[in-house]
Amino acid sequence: MWQSNAWLTLAYAVIVLTAIDANTGGARQWRHRALWLFAASGIGAAAAAIGGHSPLIGALVGASVHALVASVFIWSCDEPAAGWRRLVVALISGWVVVSVLGSAWILTTAPAFAEGFVLLSLFLLAVLTAFAVVLGFLVSRSVAAAGPVLHPGRLAMIVVVSTAVLGGVGFYMVWAEGDKRSRLAGVPTRDEVFVAPAGEAAEPVAESASARVRKADIIDMLAAQSQPSIVQLGNLALLTGEEHWAERFREALLAEAEKRAFAGPAHSVKFGQYHAMLRALFYLELRRGQPALFSAAEQARIAEWLDAVLARSLTVEWVDLLYAIPFRNLPEGPYLNQEVGVGALSLLQHTVGDAELRERAGSYLRRKAVGWRGNFRNLDDALEYQDIWMSNAYALWRYTDALDPAEAPGAQLAVDWLTAQLLQAPVPLNYGLIGPFQPLDALTIAAFGLRDGEARWLLDQRLAKLRDSGGRLPSSLGWLWLWDDNVTPVRPQRRSIAIAGPTGYNFRPGAMAPDKLVLRGAGEPELFALFGQRNRGWHRYPATGTLIALFFGTEPLVTERIVDRYHHWLPAGRAKHRDKKIDRLSLNGPMVARSGIDAWIGGVTGVYSRWSQAAPAFAPLERFVLAGDLQVARMRMADWSGVDVVRTIAMRANRWLAVWDDLTGESGLARAVSWNLVGFEPGADAGRFLQDNGAAAGALVVADAHARLRSEPIVYASRPAWPAAAPDLRVMVESRSRLRTAVVFQAGEPLAVSGQVTDVAGVIRLGDAERLVFGGQGVWHVDGIASDAALLHTSATQQGARYRLFDATHLALAPEDRCIDRLAIRTADADRWTTEDAAAGTAFTGRLDFSPGSDADLTLRLCDGDGSG
């Protein structure tokens, strides 16, 4: 495989050697140079071809590298160098090569920027180039005995230019992270955030439920900790009102004050401001409730410490300057990610003794804080980040805005954005970050700070499972003290929904854009599918158009391959293998091969797989429709390196989920679709996979005849981030040209599933009475049915044969004695189905025509004896 790096590494070294050999003593003849230039181009083309990439790109890279190194030699010295001068010229040559190639790479793949990995790639390439240059001198055929004539001025110019190029590359690399979309004008309406499928009936009504966890249970769970954290001690003191818990908190806080915790330099991680906020929170609340808890001397000592903490929070450090480039924001010290600094300043302003520091904190909060005032969604793409941001937004609202409803228009939207993505079952879920996660702080704030009964029910289910399984509460939950048994749990009746969210940054939200698609089957256990629609934000990951998770009740069927890995050579704030470091191959969706310089450097350095990290920014929905118990969605990623990707999704009740991928385009790049399955094993037939872990699930993958379908066990070099739901089998379908492939996952009641991809459509048969046909490229003919529908679903019902078509202009069937029992149509611009009452009972003539882009729901039955209904 080309990922082994052997061919590209060897080719790169040989190409540099050709440049050196073309300039050895007495060899500077134009024929000699031309021959070596031609040879370098051939070597590059051959290496690219072996690696499965365009030979033309390889030839251009080979010729460019050769010409660059040769030019440096010609320009910097009159004849080959000898002695130590050879090393000088070699290093300068390597510097120039890596500068130019690195610049070109960053310019072409800035959307795939991956923090330390980019720097590692450039560093490795520089070392390789320098090594190849030195080696070339040592093995060159003819080297002057001594004293080549160097040009110091030219060498100095090369150093200056190279330094400028490297500096520019580094600056642009970070600057390109900036989000250029327009700012969000204000908190959007609910209809702008949550889009129900067209054709949906009235929203289901939630039902009240009995509480499974009460305040006494929370106290018992906290008290059961053998060594409660300072935050847990604060919660216990406020929940119980008991003196001994307050005393233990006082002792712990004074010990931290003595150590000057959170008052020192932050280095690369400023998240300590969040922990400082929690200390200030409990200190403030306990002092209000128990004024005599801290003596005057202790209060003075704590105020002096918190003065230092606040002063440090308002101090600009080197990491702030790094953030300032992509954020395009003059730093002031408070941590901008998840508005951690806002939460810290909201509490610290009430606990410090220095009036000037209080005024600086207040000024920052008036000028820079957003929270629920103007946003509802944390702009870092992970559920865990939403939990942290909601904690800071609530701190701002409670301690700066005095719980004024007018200052929190985004509060309920923030709760609903989060809960819309949670499973009904108390299953942890996360994306973009390491490990499973339960948003307990956010649900606590929603349940008791905002009196949200549905959030109370979701929190209740998760805490009950934690309690019953003997688990422990996380040590840093800051808002359990808000607990109020008077808030009644309300069991949510969740529905499928498309979610939009802002872009930009938390401190400067940008325009709305596609975010997530959530599909839910009716009934229990719930069939739950979560799809990503974006690759934007500071802490983002390349999940555009991918299936983030598929669950049947509590059983995982498809998840992301995330590992618990720490890159120790990076600064602490960049060391976790998360966000942009997550390989597209670890996700579940379409992929396009890396190209150009990105592919070359990737092959040489081994950074990431062969598949591009530069997934499109968004995958907007073109269609989202509900027809009875069938949900259909279609999303598109246009012009991904010359490849257009259309993903069509269908879910029927709690029975199955089907996904059809159509990757078109004549770019010549390889394209593929990957699936990371949990607990599946290959079946007897190619493309069939079975699982038997309680879900009794099955999967079938079909593809074009020319496509390659393979499966392989997933090997973890690092520990899986979520061992209980870690995928263990990767299924991949790959092609060098147009790729069409379908997968169907079924759970619960097994069906005999079969399928194939023909020249005109993809066909999936689910048992004897159900069929899916995926089209989308003109008229197709399947089993006596002709249509141009992007999707057709047929099923046998008690009333007759039911046909549901999506994005169609006509349906034609073989003529039979049948009558229309029911006909409903939804035109492309309508939100509701229109029932064609006049059609009911009439004879079916064999063809129905619709306006372009329509959906239709048709049931045919045998006509009565007289041929009428």
Image (spheres, rainbow, N blue to C red):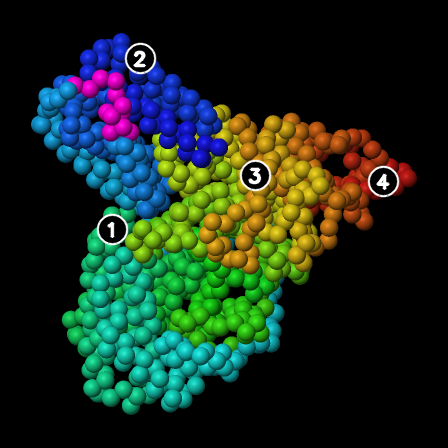
- Three-letter code for the amino acid on which mark 4 is drawn: Cys
- In the shown orientation, is residue 164 left or right of residue 19? left
> Looking at the image, is mark 1 or mark 4 earlier in the sequence?
1
* Residue that extends furthest to the front in the rendered view of this protein: 145
* CB contact under 8 Å: marks 4 and 2: no
> Looking at the image, is mark 3 or mark 4 earlier in the sequence?
3
- Answer few, some or many: residues within 10 Å of disc 3's Cα (few below 14, many 20 plus, some between 14 and 19): many
Q: Nearer the viewer, residue 321 or 164?
A: 164
Question: Dot 2: what SS?
Answer: helix
Quote the CA–CA distance across marks 3 and 4: 47 Å
Question: Dot 4: what SS?
Answer: loop
Quote the CA–CA distance across marks 3 and 1: 39 Å
What label sits on residue 268 in the rendered view? none
Q: Residue at x 53, y 57 (%)?
A: 723
Residue range corresponding to the magenta coloring: 132-144
Which is closer to the viewer, label 3 or label 2?
A: 2
Reading the image, the residue beneath label 4 is: 863
- In the shown orientation, is residue 96 left or right of residue 10? left
Quote the CA–CA distance across marks 1 and 4: 74 Å
What label sits on residue 732 in the rendered view? 3
